[in-house]
Amino acid sequence: MVSDNLKNVTQRIARCCEKCGRHPGDVSLICVTKEASVEASKEALAGGARFLGENRVQSAISKYRIIGDGASWHLIGHLQTNKAKEAVRIFSLIHSVDSAHLAGAINKEAVKIGKVQDVLVQVNVAGEESKFGVSPEKAKDLISELAQFKNIRLQGLMTIAPLVDDPERVRPYFRALRELRDHLNDKRYTINDIRHLSMGMTDDFEVAIEEGSTMVRIGRAIFGNR
Ligand SMILES: *Cc1c(COP(=O)(O)O)cnc(C)c1O
């Protein structure tokens, strides 16, 4: 049952926060509905979920048509420039900005509808070829460039850790993202302090919370394996 799973995950987040001295209110649960039906997504919302994460604009649109603003929609997957228009209309947060070109396209669409679009910069901390995201070295330049886009508000950083059996093995990547955020804030690469760290999925969210995650993106633990 989705609602039982949701309760269980929420409790695990709370317990983990308690263990590492963090406030559970500082960690948002993004329910990743990319493989879940509209019914299952609605069940999660009825069970108290607030944020739904989708990795493709197209599948988000079809769910959005039914569920609408009853959820806060997050784009967690790669965004193509030609989908920026639809993305800006639906998503309250885009987790996957990884180029100035894409940021420019998002900004342009946001200007058109008078919106300030919240975004995260996706960082490929582990340098995996299969993954999107900027390298930690290039994150600084990209973040400096974002300042020119008045209708984009940078809220933080996102990463996807490598797939491994033992979550302890991805701790260094989560730690590196936190250190990068702190460095960016210290050196004033950004206009405002950036706060958010979107990191942690079904297999590794507890380690991510211990390392400072403020948004965990969880699919399978709530909606089951496909
Ligand atoms: C699918 C996905 C998730 C959720 O993964 P689970 O292992 O099912 O929790 C999180 N983030 C991104 C970017 C995803 O594509």
Image (tube, rainbow, N blue to C red):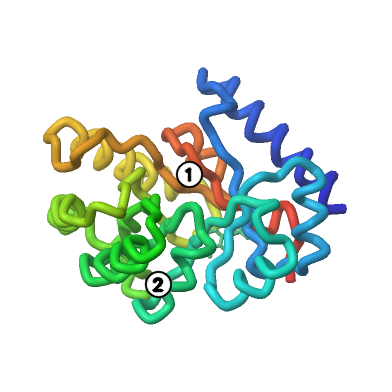
Q: Is mark 2 within 8 Å of ligand 1?
A: no
Label disc, if present, on residue 211 of the rendered structure: none
The image shows residue 59, relative to residue 73, as above or below, that is: below
Task: Residue at the far bottom: name it.
Answer: 82
Q: Position of residue 163 (x, y in %)?
A: 49, 62
- Mark 1 is surrounded, within 10 Å at the Cα level, by few (under 14), some (14 to 19) or many (20 or more) other residues, namely few
Q: Is residue 168 above or below residue 185?
A: below
Task: State the image coordinates of residue 134 (x, y, percent, origin top left).
Answer: 25, 62
Query: Identity of the amino acid at label 2?
Result: Ala
Left or right of residue 22: residue 218: right
**Where, by quadrant of the figure, is residue 108 drawn?**
bottom left
Disc 1 target residue = 168
* Location of the C terminus (image quadrant): bottom right
- Distance of mark 2 from mark 1, alpha carbons? 36 Å
Q: Is residue 21 above or below residue 79?
A: above
| Callout 2–callout 1 Cβ contact below 8 Å | no
> Residue drawn at (21%, 65%), measured in percent from left and top?
100
Amino acid type at mark 1: Glu
Secondary structure, mark 1, is helix
Seen at 73% across and 53% down, the residue is 222
| Residue placed most toward the observer, 199 or 42 | 42
- Please state the quadrant of the image where ligand 1 appears: bottom right
- Residue 146, above or below 214: below
Residue name at image x 70 percent, y 52 percent: 70
Residue occupied by mark 2: 84
Kind of element beneath mark 2: helix
Label 2 or label 1, whichever comes before in sequence order: 2
